[in-house]
Amino acid sequence: MDTVIPTVTQLIGGLIGKIWLSVSFPIYVLYILLNNNWKVLHSISDSWYVLKQKEQHEEILFTIFTYLLGIGTLLQYYHSPLFFIAGMGFFWVGTQTQFRSTVSVKGTIHYIGAVLGISLSLVGLLLQGVWLPLLIMIIGVGIMKWKKWNNFIWWSEILAFLTTIGGLWIL
C-alpha cells in the first residue's frame, strides 16, 4: 500500500485550518453568551435567532462562523476525504439558517449538515487512529442524556467541537 505524503501546501493549509477552528469557535461561543446575558441557548444554531432579534444585522455572524468551521474542517481533507464532506456539512448549516421554518426544507438541510459535519469529523479522526474524541463524545453525550442536562444539544455541540478540534491537533 502506498503512503500518501501531504505537500507543504496541504500541511500549511491544515495548520491554518486548525488555528482557524481553535480561535473562531471559542470567540463565537463567548460572543453569543455575552449577547445573551451569559445564558446558554438550546443549540449553537439558535444564536442566529438571538442575533436576529437585536436587529443590527448581526445574524450574518452565524453564517460566517459556520463557514469558518467549514473551511477549517475542509482544509483537513488530506487526512481523509470525510473532512471535506464534514466541512461541506458546516456550510449547509450556515446557509440554511432559518431552520425553524415549517414550510421549507431548510430545517432538514440544516440538521443533515450538522450531523454530517460533526459525525464525519469524528469518524475521520477515528479512521486516522485518533479514537479518543469519539469515545469522549459517546461517553459524554451518554452521561448528559442520562443526567438529563438542560440545553443538552448546546452542550453536546460544545463537546463535539472541543473533542474534534483537540483530535485534529493530535493528527
Image: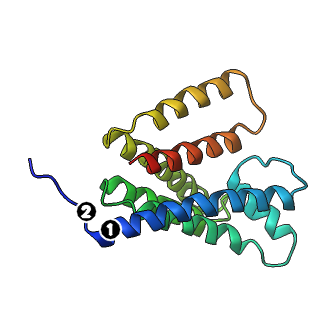
Q: Position of residue 131 (x, y in %)?
A: 40, 34
- How was this image coloured? rainbow
Q: Check disc 2 and give the amino acid type.
A: Pro
Instruction: Please give the name of the residue rendered at 59% of the width and 46% of the height, measured from the top-left corner.
Output: 162
Q: Foreground: 5 or 147?
A: 5
Q: Foreground: 67 or 50?
A: 67
Instruction: Please give the name of the residue rendered at 74% of the width and 26% of the height, measured from the top-left corner.
Output: 148
Instruction: Please give the name of the residue rendered at 65% of the width and 62% of the height, measured from the top-left corner.
Output: 103
Q: Position of residue 24 (x, y in %)?
A: 63, 63
**Count of numbered tags:** 2
Classify mark 1: helix, strand or loop. Answer: helix
* Residue corresponding to mark 1: 10
Q: Position of residue 87 (x, y in %)?
A: 45, 61
Instruction: Please give the name of the residue rendered at 68% of the width and 56% of the height, measured from the top-left corner.
Output: 26
Q: Foreground: 14 or 113?
A: 14
Direction from residue 51 to residue 144 in the image, left or right: left
* Residue corresponding to mark 2: 6
Is residue 87 visible in the rendered image? The answer is yes
Q: Check disc 1 and give the amino acid type.
A: Gln
Direction from residue 46 to residue 113 in the image, left or right: left
Look at the numbered discs 2 and 1 and tell me whether their residues touch, using CB distance below 8 Å.
Answer: yes
